[in-house]
Image: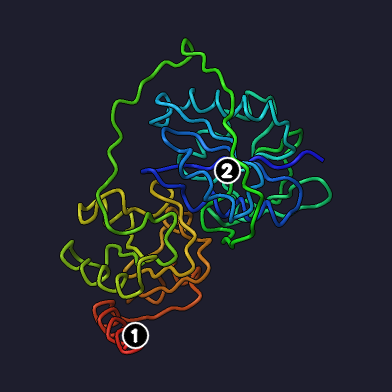
Amino acid sequence: MPGTLIYAEVQKGEIKKGAFEITSKAKEFGGDVSVCIIGKGVEAIAPQLAKYGADKIYVVDGPEFENYVTETFVQALTQVAQQLQPSVILASASAQGKDLMPAVAARLKVGAVSDCVEIKKEGDKIIAKRPLYAGKAYAVVEAVGTPQVISVRPNALGFKEIAGAGAVEKAAVSIDAGKVKVAVKEVVIAASTEPDQTEAEIIVSGGRGMKGPENYKMLEDLAKLFGPTATTGASRAAVDAGWRDHAFQVGQTGKTVSPNLYIAAGISGAIQHMAGMGTSKVIVAINKDPEAPIFTKADYGVVDDLFNVIPALIEEVKKIKG
């Protein structure tokens, strides 16, 4: 049976964690696992994928791939897929993955299943589970045609080290520059020492109940206590009020996240917000209003003023950490 092809996204010279997740999951499914990595200077980091299950790593490396441009990357990945003829193509459902994979599917004349939170193998097919109606329901779907093109929400699967052969090979692709209608001159990434919300294991988010931007420091303090895999987030109300940058927004019009722990402080739980964090493994809600919709999604709820709860939580975490 033809194997699986993974697209490994690179950002700021590093392979994104989502690539390790889907590669190790594909290795669990069995069969040959190939990974395509595209960028400038990516050949040096390609071998990292071997310890997460990559048997073969196809490198598309060149100055024209320094920045992500849809047409350029679509041509490259499509050509690699045509050469390998995989039964499945997987990518992380990041902003880039959501843009890239449907276009690749269109070139290959097959369907695409996006933003899945679970995938499993049944026979020679992958069955995927994805949220519908802002997370209120789930659909279990199968992509018709070969290859199956599927993107998986970051942090949905988890990952583990599962060694693959890791043979690195340069892929031969030819880009039709005449079809490339845009050029990316600069990519500006928000400066932050915190991990990206889509890859964070713990997120401490604040909403309208934070009362002002100055109070977010206590959420930052709590996140720091949880360690380097923790970060902060915000609801749309807080972002619209100018208290936090849009880069921190979690929700349908912000980032979709699936951390192991999501703490919602002073967030009422608008449907748009819950669509963005509803697949978190454990949700803790802190709100003065016992009728706040966020409690319907929460695993643990604290009906109290967040200005009482967060400082107390900080002190307790400090005690535990010694």
Badges 1 and 2: C-beta atoms under 8 Å apart? no
The image shows a total of numbered marks equal to 2
Determine crowd level at label 1: few under 14, some 14-19, many 20+ residues with C-alpha closer than 10 A: few
Residue 183 shows in the view: yes
Q: Identify the residue position indicated by label 2 in the image.
A: 91
> What mark, if any, has residue 6 been given in the picture?
none
State the SS at label 2. Answer: strand
Q: Earlier in the sequence, mark 1 or mark 2?
A: 2
Provide residue 71's location: percent of width, then percent of height: 49, 23
Q: Is residue 108 left or right of residue 178?
A: right
Compare residues 299 and 23 and report the one nearer the observer: 23
Q: Identify the residue position indicated by label 1 in the image.
A: 321
Query: Considering the image in quadrants, where does the N terminus appear?
Result: top right
Q: Is residue 304 above or below residue 202?
A: below
Compare residues 257 and 228 and report the one nearer the observer: 228
Kindly identify the residue that appears in the image at 40 percent across and 26 percent down. 63
Q: Is residue 96 above or below residue 211?
A: above
> Given the current orientation, which residue lies at the most extreme top position?
178
Q: Amino acid at mark 1?
A: Lys
Residue 133 shows in the view: no
